[in-house]
Image (cartoon, helix red, strand yellow):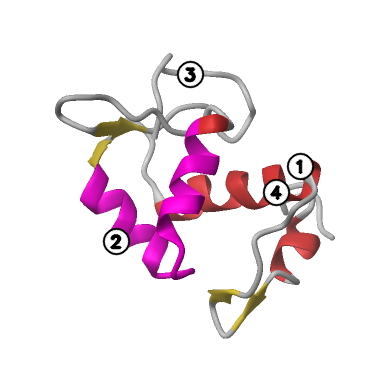
Amino acid sequence: MSETEPRGSHQVAALFSGGRLTVIPRKPARREQLLEHLARTLFERDRVYTEREVNDALLTVHEDCSALRRYLVVAGRGEGRRPGRSFPRGRGVSGRNDSGGGL
C-alpha cells in the first residue's frame, strides 16, 4: 500500500468484484473501512442528498441499499432526517465530524 492510499484500501478492494460489492462485512472494523470508502467515493462533501439519491448511489455497488444506508447513518456518516429525508454527508475521511450532519 502506498502512502497516498487510505488505510485498509486493499481489504476494501477485496470486498468488490467487477465494481460490485460482493459482501457487507459483519465485523465492525472491516465494515467501518467499507463505509469510509463508500462515503468518500460515492458522495461529495458539503452536499445534501435526498434519500432517493443516496439509494441510487448505493445501488451502483450493491442491491441492498437500505442496509448500506442504515449502516452509514449508524456509523455517523449519514443522517436521516424527517420529514424531508435529506442526508447531509457527515464525518469526513479523517473521521471527525466536519458538519455535524450526515451524508
- In the drawing, does residue 59 fall left or right of residue 51? right
Counting residues from the N terminus, which is met first, the one under dot 3 or under dot 4?
4
- Looking at the image, is mark 3 or mark 4 nearer the viewer? 4
Residue furthest top as drawn: 100
Q: Nearer the viewer, residue 11 or 68?
A: 68
Q: Main secondary structure of the magenta part?
A: helix
Q: Nearer the viewer, residue 18 or 31?
A: 31
Counting residues from the N terminus, which is met first, the one under dot 3 or under dot 2?
2
Which three-letter amino acid code belongs to the residue tagged 3?
Asp
Task: Assess whether residue 59 is covered by the magenta stretch.
Answer: yes
Q: Quadrant of the C terminus?
A: top left
Corner quadrant of residue 84: top left
The CA distance from mark 1 to mark 4 is 5 Å
> Mark 4 and 2 residues: CB-CB less than 8 Å, in contact?
no
Within-10-Å neighbours for mark 2: few <14, some 14–19, many 20+: few
- Identify the residue position indicated by label 3 in the image: 98
Counting residues from the N terminus, which is met first, the one under dot 2 or under dot 1?
1
The residue positioned 48% from the left and 18% from the top of the image is 98
- Identify the residue position indicated by label 2 in the image: 56
- Identify the residue position indicated by label 1 in the image: 28
- Identify the residue position indicated by label 4 in the image: 31
Q: Which residues are magenta?
A: 51-73
Task: Assess whether residue 99 is covered by the magenta stretch.
Answer: no
Which three-letter amino acid code belongs to the residue tagged 4?
Arg
Q: Nearer the viewer, residue 36 or 74?
A: 74
> Mark 1 and 4 residues: CB-CB less than 8 Å, in contact?
yes
